[in-house]
Amino acid sequence: MPYILGIDTGGTYTDGVLLDFERKTVVAKAKAFTTPGDLTLGIAECIANLGEINPQEIKMVSLSTTLATNAIVEGRGGKVGLILIGYRPDGKFPAQMLSVISGGHDGLGTAKCELDTQELARVIAQMKGEVDTLAISGIFSISNPEHENLAREFVRREWDVPIICAHELSSDIGLYERTVTACLNAKLLPIISDLLGAVKGVLKRKKIEVPLMVVKGDGSLISEEKALERPIETILSGPAASVVGAMFLADRDTFLTLDMGGTTTDIGIVKNSYWRRQEEGAIVAGWKTHIHTTGLSTFGIGGDSYLRVKAKGQLCLGPTRVIPLCVMGLRHPHLIRELREIQQSKAVNGTIFDGQTLDCWMIVKPPSDPESLSRDERLIVQELADGPHNVQWLKERIGNYVSPFALKSLEQARVIGRISFTPTDVLHCLGLLKKWNAEASLAGARILANSYGTKLENFAAKCLETMTQSITLAILQSIAAKQGYTFDIKDETLKFFLEPFFQEKHRNLDLCVPLGLNYPIVAIGAPVTAYLPEVGRLLRAEVIIPEHSEVASAVGAAMGKVAEKITALVKPGFKVHAPWGCEAFMYQEEACERILTKGKAIVLENAKKAGIINPEITVNRDKVISDTNFGPVFLEEFFEIIASGYRQEESEE
């Protein structure tokens, strides 16, 4: 019986499912902790937890992951050197080093001047040993990539380093966004390489020798080889798979999907079994890219979000992910004793550097080259060798001083990880979750409650309320963004509406603010049962938490197909904007028919080249009309034409 093995490696958990290919049913499911220090361990444990697997029955392995998204949100990844050709930046880039050299082209593809290889040689000498990867971006490289290619070849002769050129990732107009995309792709190279290497290693030991596919940010699949070259295309891979999984598990065609993991919450809207692509490019952690993904909004809210008390009465949630106290307290009970010692000390009311006094630290991945560490970094790693410890304990062992810069650099390099108070700990304090060590959570809550200026019970309730309100605001922001609006939740004037909306028990005498969704919320992810019922009450919406929701991304990965697609627009005046060019028509029907006829022919040809057998053609259309005083006005009609199916080698003989 043919099975598909779906794996989702997230920032907190690795999920796995066995899907019956013919019946489209979940045969087995399993979860395991993601192990950042060695991804193989978490993946192997997850597959082992699925039970006995006959390798001959597995026809495909499909992988979705939130690791790329989480890495961008948390600022992790390789150190990137950015070489700009022919222009000076007007904004920040996700790179550690940046240099500008002469060269570049104009809009017609004509070189403005020769590429300055002498400058390039000096730049290479400066960056060697300082960065892990290179991104090269030249002005108007989409018109003529000559100088980007020449620069890459020059670097390769001098330096063995991974290189990505901006024109390889995007042909869209927008120099800044194209450069950001190249930088993020370079930054993600080691992260995706580690992940795919771990998966391949586990599969080899299990004697599962089938194609490995990866879910893209638009929900379709790409090969392992393409994912290694273009890891940026896997941003929002996990959330895209979760939408596919939510559609399958909930059996609804119109809903708001909310996927909460350990690090992020991803929100999207499905209408009539269709969700529109993010045509303007995905935005992750404030970085605008040229990667077209599923139209989802990502927020740094999760079960493992960092909860901090910045000052008395001031609670801060996320976006950084930390390891919950309850999880590490179960594995290392001595941390509870260290937290209780903090509670009894004068340090209880203080905050330290980029954190707070209850923060603990542990080795996540031992440094590959200990000699490259600074003295302060070596001291920290040495004292954490026997297990995780609180920062106050470290101060006493090291000599009453722990370098905040050393802690920060080790954390960014993922050598050490932070353990602190999270929403998962809140649930343990309130008795809503009893999976790990509640004593560790309570010890941390007592410290923070004192800093906040209230009793433990009130503090835990405030944390739960903050989490619920943050999720509700994220939903409202997502809907606003879909309709072309934005609002800043820090805007003081918003309190006029938000306070009477959230504080129904203490109603504003002058104003009530009822809001409601016109469709249900399909909530997936392990933590949603604790928060979404209250969110649904606030938004007057039905909340659906389907069976297998805790492994929905793995289900979506298993349900994914290889897809070839094109998009086109009909604009006012019945102008067609399509990959084959711009055309004008007398009637709207003619314009639409042109897109359908030529578009289907193109995707079928591309599907054939990709090895897809018996491709299924899907046409998604989205017409935008504005109501005015003079009647409805046509603004545009969006077409997405998809040929999808399974590759020849993935099918049965």
Image (spheres, rainbow, N blue to C red):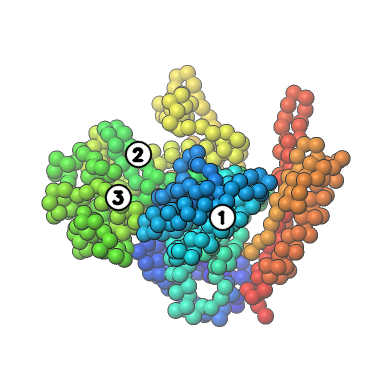
Q: Is residue 57 visible?
A: yes
- C-alpha gap between disc 1 and disc 2: 43 Å
- Residue carrying label 1: 148
Quadrant location of the N terminus in the rendered image: bottom right
Q: Position of residue 103 (x, y in %)?
A: 56, 49
**Of the image marks 2 and 3, the number of the one nearer the N terminus:** 2
Residue pictured at 61% horizontal, 59% vertical: 220
Which circle, 1 or 3, is nearer the viewer?
1
Q: Give whichever of 232, 114 is nearer the camera.
A: 114
Q: Using residue 172 as the reference point, say whether residue 582 is left or right of it.
A: right
- The reply to whether the C-beta atoms of the residues labelled 2 and 3 are less than 8 Å apart is no
Residue pictured at 43% horizontal, 39% vertical: 470
Q: Position of residue 471 (x, y in %)?
A: 46, 41
- Residue carrying label 3: 408
Q: Which amino acid does the dot numbered 3 rest on?
A: Lys
Number of callouts in the render? 3
Instruction: Rate crowding at label 1 as few (under 14), some (14 to 19) or many (20 or more) other CA atoms within 10 Å.
Output: many
Q: Position of residue 50 (x, y in %)?
A: 46, 71
Q: Which amino acid does the dot numbered 2 rest on?
A: Cys
- Residue carrying label 2: 316
Callout 2: SS: strand
Residue pictured at 57% horizontal, 78% vertical: 57
Residue lying at the far right of the rendered structure: 586
